[in-house]
Image (cartoon, grey):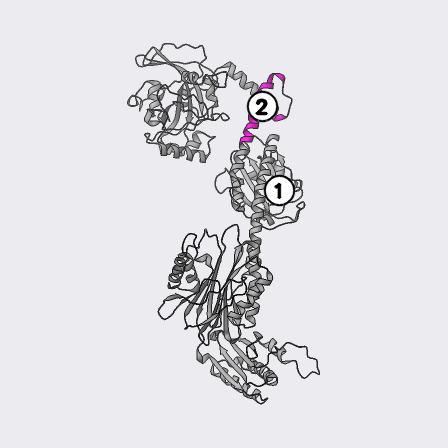
Amino acid sequence: MDHGTERDAPPGHRAGPDTVPADPVTGRVPLAVVVVDRDGLVSHWSRGARRLFALSKEEAIGRPAPDLLPVSGVLPEDAEPDGAGHDDSYRSYTAHDGPGPGLESSLDGRLSYPAAGRARLTVRADDRVDVLWWAYPLVGPGPERLLVLAADADGLRRDYADGTDDSAGPAVVERIAPAFALHTDFPGADELARRLPEILPSMSVGESARIVAQVLELGYPVLEFSRHDRVPVTPDWGVPRRAERRARRERAARALAAGEPVPDELRDEAEDLEYAAVRERLEFLNEVSGAIGTSLDLSRTIVEVSRAVVPRFTDVAGTYLREQVVAGEGFPDGVPDTTTMWHRVALEHTDEPGRWDDVVPVGEAMPFPVHTPFFQCMTTGEPVLVPRITEEMGHAIASQFEKRDIRPLITGRSMLLVPLKARTVVLGFMILLRHPERPVFNDMDRVTGAELAARAGLVLDNARMYTHQENVAETLQDSMLPHIPARLAGCDIATRYLPGTLLGRVGGDWFDAVKLPGARTALVVGDVMGHGLNSAAMMGQLRTAVQTMAGLDLPPAQLLRNLDDLAQRLGDTHLATCLYAVYDPIAGELHLANAGHIPPVLVRAEDGASELIDLPTGAPIGVGGVPFESVRVPVAPGDRLVMCTDGLVEVRGEDIGVGLATLCESAAHPAASMDDACDTIIRALGAGGGRKDDVALLMARLTGIEPDAVAEWRLARDPAEVGRARVAVREQLHDWGLPKLVAAAELMVSELVTNAVRHSHARPVALRLVRADTLLCEVDDDDHELPALKSAGPGDETGRGLRVVSTLAREWGASRTGAGKTVWFELTLPARHR
């Protein structure tokens, strides 16, 4: 890769043969790039090579590389060219022996590892060029064998003379970490790009992919700099002053790493190293802090924490959290013990894909024994540093993994364990591992890891508390919303509840369905104004009140009147709207009353037409002193009733009539099932996300009950009528094909009719059987006192009737009516009759 003409440079950068940006950190250096094939012939000659070696591409391609490239080792500063030329003095090289191999060793294939050097050449007899070169053997398939990079050392010296290094010149290149990619005019560019990690062993696969993508997208080559990295080959350029300073720094670094006193003559180098190390740590921590905590989602936060440290700080990062943290639950304070379960929630590494997945899969939970460093970390809450995992320790750790040998993955690596804490409570810990060839973790890394864990612990604790609160809110909401069966007598029901915002998963919207005497069903939708726990609490109180009053079989208008009185007693801080409807499947009728709620939609089965039911709106619950009215609407089997809260149809800045029209249209859309019909409405009104208000939706398909599934009798106030009732029930059940229910039904009807005849005053007793999803039996009389279970002794003559009913019936109950009371029971139908 090289700089060629100005069109090869990025916008705003003027490139040319003598142009090098002054900034050594972000600048770009003109390089000659030459690729040599397996026969030793030049297969690529870049524009930079044309400028540096004054030889055109046509003249270079196909020629032996040793004829064109500098082949010396290291050239001392005071060396002079020998004047010997090649091809009529076209160029001449001064060859000097020095430490390290020369380029000729790479060109003839004797070297299989990267090399570097320096040479001085004469171009056209009067122009001398001091050249720095690097040679990288290419491994793998393909004809290319060697990548050679060269740069004008004098140009580097001139442009970097004002840098911080006092030995400006060739030595500055030691601070350059090149990431090379070829121009797309080279036919083998794609293959070479895939082999970049082989050319530059210190480059990760991710860096290689990024660099190649940048080259292909922007169309110009890339050379990146770093003050902290070195090229894979660090040549000795023959500058004693630079070598001496490097040696002093290395001595100072060894003393610091070993914790030994630093000699006075190395004090300056040690201070520089410490300052650079501290600055690098601070930069790293700042970057990590910015990379984590971007959301309150616990799983996403865990991934962010793990990825923030790989590969810059460590090569492997495994994150373990306490079981209760993963579940979003609270847990008692205190030190974990050997029974504490730790879930492996994330694992990031730089090894080949899949190497760790089978041995230490994410999601596994395990305790840790006392003798392990993991137990020490989680109980003390302090980092644990293991410079190298020995064979013995590797075996001890591997013993925790049944039928899996983890030793090859960990033995010989440096390990640092850091606790993830929040307010002195250990939420989890991270296992950080470095490859054996990488420097071991030291005390400064321990401090850095502790600070990293402290910041990560706070972020994880915030996510944990949010998850915990969200679970509490969902549990509260679920407990307040009823679980309505999909089928009740004469109707099928489907519901939906959607919270308004992610931060407020509880609200005041509710729906309900209550079984009433006479195979009827009460359908309710309500909305307490406001959001949050207060509204949810008010909603729970009103819903309970509605259920209680519905069980008393109060007329819709009277029920809303009583509910308004209750809201007044509870306080005037909340208002609520409520729509209450009673469906009678035998009469084919809806009885409705409204308290400030949006009207329901009725979809006719006959023609598929939909309409808003016109009924008096009434004032919201809690206003007080306002009358409520009810209406009766005839319905046919197959009609559908749609009731919802205003969050479904209201859009800020838009007339609610638009939403109601869309509701009518979408409700009439054909659907394969009730659930599909609800989903169609939700999609049509855009309630899938981004709402500020809650949504409650209830849809009921009014299937009705056929007349031949109902049998009724009037019985006189005569004990002899009890026998007649038994006979009538027996014959009717045989007609319906339910002989297995005869014995139980006949016995329970006998008990209920006996009580009704005994306690009625003037009106006849009514007996009714209804065959729906269950067999329903009802007995009406004009006595208002409800029966109750009693404990009957051996000598008592009464008190056993309801005990028999309670034992044999699927369900039973009693409720007051306008004329007296109704006592009923249900029996489960055989499967083929349901």
Q: Secondary structure at mark 2?
A: helix
Identify the amino acid type marked 2: Ala
The answer to which quarter of the image holds residue 462 is top right
Name the foreground residue: 523 vs 564. 564
Residue 779 percent location from the top left of the image = 55, 80
**Residue linked to disc 2:** 253
Question: Which quadrant holds the N terminus?
Answer: top left
Task: From this view, report whether residue 601 is shown above or below residue 228.
Answer: below
| Badge 1 or badge 2: first in the primary sequence | 2
Which amino acid, mark 1? Ala
Residue contact at pointers 1 and 2, CB within 8 angstroms: no
**Mark 1 crowd level (few <14, some 14–19, many ≥20, 10 Å Cα):** some
* Residue nearer the viewer, 745 or 123: 745
Q: Is residue 298 left or right of residue 675?
A: right
The answer to whether residue 590 is above or below residue 413 is below
Give the prevailing secondary structure in the magenta stretch.
helix
> On the rendered structure, is 277 left or right of 494?
right
- The residue where tag 1 is placed is 422
| Residue 57 x %, y % | 30, 23
Residue drawn where x is 45% and y is 67% of the image:
616
Q: Quadrant of residue 662?
A: bottom left
Residue at coordinates 68% horizontally, 79% vertically from top-left? Answer: 792
Q: Helix, strand, or loop for circle 1?
A: strand
Where in the figure is residue 584, as x and y percent of width and height?
Answer: 47, 74
Whether residue 403 is visible, yes or no, is: no
What is the span of residues highlighted in magenta in the rendered image? 257-283
Q: For the residues carrying marks 1 and 2, which lies nearer the camera in this image?
A: 1
